[in-house]
Image (spheres, rainbow, N blue to C red):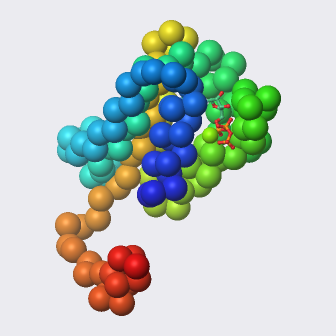
Amino acid sequence: MYQLLMNLCINAGQAMGESGELTITLTPVPEGETDKAAVCLQVADTGPGMEQAVLDRLFEPLFTTRYDQGGSGIGLMVVQSIVQNHGGWITVDSRPGEGTAFRVFLPVGSGEWVPVPEAALQEAME
Ligand SMILES: Nc1ncnc2c1ncn2[C@@H]1O[C@H](COP(=O)(O)OP(=O)(O)OP(=O)(O)O)[C@@H](O)[C@H]1O
Ligand SMILES: [Mg+2]
């Protein structure tokens, strides 16, 4: 999740350049709106947005419009695979001049909490 969030936020930052607004929101998806109960993690920016030609190729491995600035086109490919590994899905809302919103939908479980083993907690704190 950390890697997913970092990739989306770095992209937003790079798109906005000197100034802009980055908004991260986590909201439950109302029941009935999707097949499964889910939460929506949205990363939105007020950057330049994307043209359809870019949107069409967005998750393609090695697709980048930032080749000159050292972009490798790996970021969103990784985001896509992390989302899939969690059984989720991702949507993009973007238009030239109107900013971009990536929404990551993650299914929520049965509602039972699974305790994190003490050793794993210790390791995470280090
Ligand atoms: N928030 C955004 N606003 C505008 N364009 C975006 C945004 N996020 C991604 N893009 C476009 O999608 C392309 C692919 O993104 P991706 O993260 O996969 O690669 P990258 O950022 O170019 O390179 P890398 O992540 O490997 O450093 C970017 O080059 C850019 O054109
Ligand atoms: Mg990137």
Direction right: furthest residue: 68
Quadrant where the C terminus is found in the figure: bottom left
Splitting the image into 4 quarters, where does residue 73 fall?
A: top right
> How many discs mark residues in the rendered view?
0
- Image region (quadrant) for ligand 2: top right
Direction bottom: furthest residue: 119
55 relative position to 87: left or right: right
The residue shown at (51%, 22%) is: 18
- Place of residue 42 in the rendered image (x, y in percent of width and height, measured from the top left): 37, 38
**75 over 81 or under it: above or below:** above
Foreground of the two, 126 or 30: 126
- Place of residue 37 in the rendered image (x, y in percent of width and height, measured from the top left): 27, 52
Foreground of the two, 83 or 75: 75
- Place of residue 38 in the rendered image (x, y in percent of width and height, measured from the top left): 30, 50
**21 over 51 or under it: above or below:** below
The residue shown at (39%, 46%) is: 105
**48 over 27 or under it: above or below:** above
Quadrant where the N terminus is found in the figure: bottom left
- Place of residue 81 in the rendered image (x, y in percent of width and height, measured from the top left): 59, 54
